[in-house]
């Protein structure tokens, strides 16, 4: 398992998350190019090493005769090498990334071994765009990576459109230990990316409560969010705190659209979900439907 680094620094920036090694998994799609661009942006701020990896799955070779299998693999690797060079050239990052093509039975075991071997801190992958309607799934490969990766995973849609002005980060919290852990990443990115951060908590409330009751709950939750700020951020950043009422998934997506968020950060519990914690089903819906890249942190 790759354990995200939370490294102590001297001064007001202590502690800070370090994305020293970033793995960008590419299938050469438009979403993969967007993923590389965002990874390069993060790498510039964290002085990271980027590993650009394409996995050639050999699971389909049972449809090929044994005599032709070697030739199919050769052609697939040759194609991947050309596409890798094109992607690096278009992204303008020649000489700045380590490129590697791996092959095996299926994609995730190959990437998992790479994550372990190189102590990867962040895995970045592109999706194929969300279109005009809400997507219901990431696709089998991306979904497997999302569900099984132990390191932080950043999913990037092909249709992400940059806007002028400050980078905007949305951090959704439910005050559980994994959310508190993810807060360190959200605030570190806020600092390193010189971004504006919105901290959001959604109170699941299907009843029509009087506004006075909502006001009391809102004040309580805002104070709780303030107390949840990492010590290094107290007095060093000015987050916007929001409390919404209703369906968790709908409210988070609504705030992301209203804020024109550039990045959403979510904490997730490792292993099986339990009652009262942000279930992976909600996080998965958010990753599929979010109008911006989503960083998921497990603990």
Image (tube, rainbow, N blue to C red):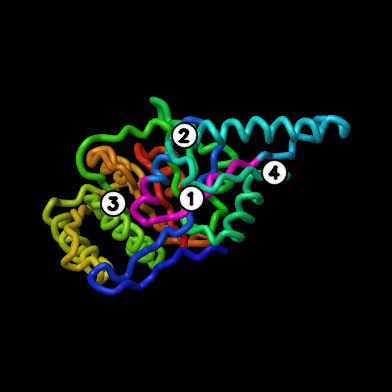
**Farthest residue, direction top:** 132
Label 4 vs 2, first from the N-terminus: 2
Residue hosting label 3 = 193
- Residue beneath disc 2: 31
Camera-near label (4 vs 1) is 1
Left or right: 17 as drawn, with respect to 232: right
In this rendering, the answer to whether 10 lies above or below 241 is below
Asked if the residue under mark 2 is in contact with the one under mark 4, i.e. CB atoms within 8 Å, the reply is: no
Provide the secondary structure element on which disc 3 rests. Answer: loop
Query: Considering depth in this image, is 12 or 198 the residue closer to the camera?
Result: 12
In the image, residue 15 lies at what x, y percent? Answer: 32, 70
| Residue 144 drawn above or below residue 69 | below
Mark 1 secondary-structure assignment: strand
Q: Residues within 10 Å of mark 4 (few under 14, many from 20)?
A: some
* Label 1 close to label 3 by CB (< 8 Å): no
Question: Circles 4 and 1: CB distance less than 8 Å?
Answer: no
The span from disc 1 to disc 3 (Cα, nearest Å) is 17 Å
**Residue ID at (61%, 50%):** 111
Q: Which residue is mark 4?
A: 103
Q: Quadrant of residue 135?
A: top left
Q: Give the mark nearest the N terminus, 1 or 3.
A: 1
Horizontal side, residue 104 vs residue 267: left or right: right
Q: Is residue 235 above or below residue 90?
A: below
The first of marks 3 and 2 along the sequence is 2
State which quadrant residue 176 falls in: bottom left
Q: Which residue is mark 1?
A: 50
The disc, 3 or 4, on the residue closer to the chain's N-terminal end is 4
Instruction: Say whether marks 3 and 4 touch (CB < 8 Å).
Output: no
Residue shown at 39% from the left, 70% from the top: 7
Can residue 210 be found in the magenta stretch? no
């Amino acid at each position: 398992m790759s354990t995200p680094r939370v490294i102590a620094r001297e001064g007001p920036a202590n502690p800070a998350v370090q994305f020293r090694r970033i793995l960008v998994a590419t299938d050469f799609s438009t979403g993969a190019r967007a993923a590389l661009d965002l990874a390069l942006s993060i790498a510039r701020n964290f002085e990271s090493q980027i590993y650009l990896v394409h996995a050639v799955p050999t699971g389909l070779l049972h449809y090929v005769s044994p005599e032709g299998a070697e030739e199919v693999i050769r052609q697939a690797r040759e194609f991947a090498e050309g596409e890798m060079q094109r992607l690096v050239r278009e992204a303008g990052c020649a000489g700045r990334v380590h490129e590697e093509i791996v092959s095996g039975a299926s994609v995730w075991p190959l990437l998992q071994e790479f994550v372990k071997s190189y102590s990867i801190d962040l895995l970045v992958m592109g999706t194929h765009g969300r279109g005009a309607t809400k997507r219901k799934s990431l696709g089998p490969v991306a979904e497997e990576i999302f569900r099984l990766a132990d390191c932080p995973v950043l999913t990037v849609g092909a249709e992400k459109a940059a806007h002028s002005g400050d980078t905007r980060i949305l951090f959704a919290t439910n005050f559980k230990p994994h959310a508190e852990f993810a807060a360190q990443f959200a605030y570190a990115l806020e600092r390193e990316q010189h971004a504006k951060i919105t901290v959001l908590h959604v109170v699941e409330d299907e009843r029509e409560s009087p506004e006075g009751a909502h006001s009391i709950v809102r004040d309580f939750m805002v104070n709780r969010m303030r107390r949840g700020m990492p010590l290094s951020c107290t007095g060093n950043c000015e987050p916007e705190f929001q409390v919404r009422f209703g369906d968790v998934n709908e409210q988070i997506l609504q705030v992301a659209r209203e804020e024109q968020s550039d990045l959403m950060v979510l904490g997730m519990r490792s292993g099986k979900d339990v009652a009262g914690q942000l279930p992976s089903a909600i996080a998965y819906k958010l990753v599929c439907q979010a109008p911006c890249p989503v960083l998921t942190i497990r603990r």
